[in-house]
Amino acid sequence: MEQNTVLYASISLLLIILVSKLFKKSFHLPPSPFPKLPIIGHLHLIKPPLHRTLDTLSKTFGPIISLQFGSSLVVVVSSPAAVEECFTKNDVVLADRPRLTMGKYMGYNWSTMAGASYGDHWRNLRRISSLEIFSTSRLNSFLSIRRDEVNQLLLTLSQNARTGFNKIVPKPNLNVLSFNIVMRMIAGKRYYGDVVDDQEEAKNVRKIIEEVLSISNSYPGDFLPFLKWIDYKNYQKRAATLSKKMDQILQGIIEEHRSGEGRNSMVDHLLSLQESQPDSHSDVIIKGLMAVRMLINPAVFCLIEVNCS
């Protein structure tokens, strides 16, 4: 008798869930491609390159369409006028960011500027970036670094030319130039090229960055939660391991500059502000700012591609 009661209760609960799904409010969503499959939604329609696929769907269903990527609802906006409205009139409404697994492990629990949702914390990060990192006075203070790196690039090209006729491929050299400028502004060190401060440290940093970028693609578990529950392809385990390695590198840079061994860099400036504003300039915030500058950099992707080829 008791078993029958449990069975009937389970069936009733299942029916309630199904009915609620059927009559769930649609929120007047934009047009959506057919069919939307159970569990995966429209993921079966997504093929590389992604921007071409979305462009094709937009031409078929309109400039604003809705897609279901597993458990995540996505709205694709391809109309210039609509995009402008999204970034002007509705910028605050659309300012939140999805909590992706990558942001948890590599973004200090979604606390970096690239992963944090709009709010007081994000506004503080933006203030630090705009006033204390990218202000005209701060950028002017790094002018000597930019000049030095350009001179180093010209010297490298000149030395290569002396060995005979060599084909010059500008892109890899310009990527080294760009990344080294960024890293010298952040930490006062070079990590790519023939002239580096510490070969072993530079090799370790390059290896960690390469490993982090190797798992930076979309993780299926972010759209299909059951894959996250079983840790599909050990993604979360690998991300947690890399997170610890990356944190050791960033914390090491901070400790080096805190002990007075560093140079006039972004880290030095933020550490000086930490003394009077410890909450808004904590080590975690400084490491998050460093990680964003290091990893979300087009030059890094190109450098890794060259090194892996």
Image (tube, grey):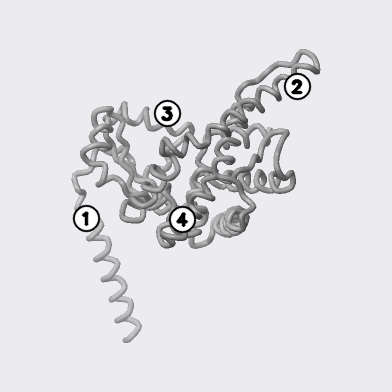
Q: Is residue 27 left or right of residue 168?
A: left
**Amino acid at dot 2:** Gln
Instruction: Give the Cα separation between the discs numbered 4 and 2.
Output: 41 Å
Instruction: Give the Cα separation between the discs numbered 2 and 3.
Output: 42 Å
Dot 3 falls on a residue whose secondary structure is helix
Residue 83, how many percent across, how many down?
28, 33
Identified at 55% across, 38% down, the residue is: 182
Numbered badge on residue 55: none
| Circle nearer the viewer, 2 or 3 | 2
Circle 2 is placed at which residue position?
159
Q: Is residue 237 left or right of residue 109?
A: right
Circle 3 is placed at which residue position?
52
Instruction: Give the Cα separation between the discs numbered 1 and 2.
Output: 68 Å
| Circle nearer the viewer, 1 or 4 | 4
Q: For the C terminus, which image quadrant?
A: top right
Name which of mark 2 and mark 3 comes first in the sequence: 3
**Amino acid at dot 3:** Arg
Name which of mark 4 and mark 3 comes first in the sequence: 3
Name which of mark 4 and mark 2 comes first in the sequence: 2
Circle 1 is placed at which residue position?
24
Circle 4 is placed at which residue position?
285
Q: Is residue 58 left or right of residue 267?
A: left
Name which of mark 3 and mark 1 comes first in the sequence: 1
Name, please, the residue furthest toward the top: 165
| 10 Å crowding of disc 3: few (<14), some (14-19), many (20+) | few
**Amino acid at dot 4:** Ile
Dot 2 falls on a residue whose secondary structure is helix
| 10 Å crowding of disc 2: few (<14), some (14-19), many (20+) | few
